[in-house]
Image (spheres, grey):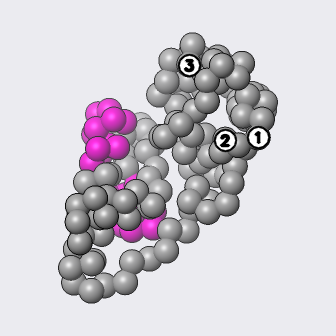
Amino acid sequence: MSTQNITRIARRYPRIIRWSDEDNCYIGTLPDICGDCCDAPTAAEVATQLDTIAEDWVETALTEGLPLPAPKSALTTGTTPFTGGNIPAAIKRLREYRGLTQVQLAELLGCSPSTLIKWENGIRRPSGAAARLLAVLYHHPELVNE
């Protein structure tokens, strides 16, 4: 199977990145594949490690003829307010529900406050990892440490 296909399949599996005060680093989790599986001083490094681990796992499973589990996350099935509809209002409601300021939510998402303000004002839309993390906050707020 081509590297592109392996990458495409691996991207279906959700990733969770959280800060650990105990370990003083970010922890990466692939809940449908192997649980906690990496750590690093930055969320970006963990994200890169998670991509590599997921791709290696998918490639090994396919090579050995093992079945791939279906991704179970609400992020890969169904919709959230961040995949359509009134995104600015959904972000503001989520932020207010969590009791966060725009600066705090921006820090949690790893984006600048000005980017978050643009999302809330409908000037830009979250995409990629930011949209997925917003969906995690929406569906499973207990998984994200503030």
Name the foreground residue: 44 vs 36. 44
Cα separation, mark 1 vs mark 3, equals 19 Å
**Where residue 82 is drawn, which disc sits there?**
2
Is residue 42 highlighted in magenta? yes
Q: Mark 3 points at which residue?
A: 115
Q: Where is residue 88 in the image (x, y as percent from the top left)?
A: 73, 28
Cα separation, mark 2 vs mark 1, equals 7 Å
- Mark found first going from the N terminus, 2 or 3: 2
What residue type is disc 3 on? Answer: Thr
Residue 54 seen from this side: no
Name the foreground residue: 2 vs 42. 2
Q: Where is residue 128 in the image (x, y as percent from the top left)?
A: 49, 40
Q: Name the residue under label 1.
A: 85
Name the foreground residue: 55 vs 18. 55
Whether residue 124 is situated above or below residue 64 in the rendered picture: above
Q: What stretch is highlighted in magenta?
A: 29-49
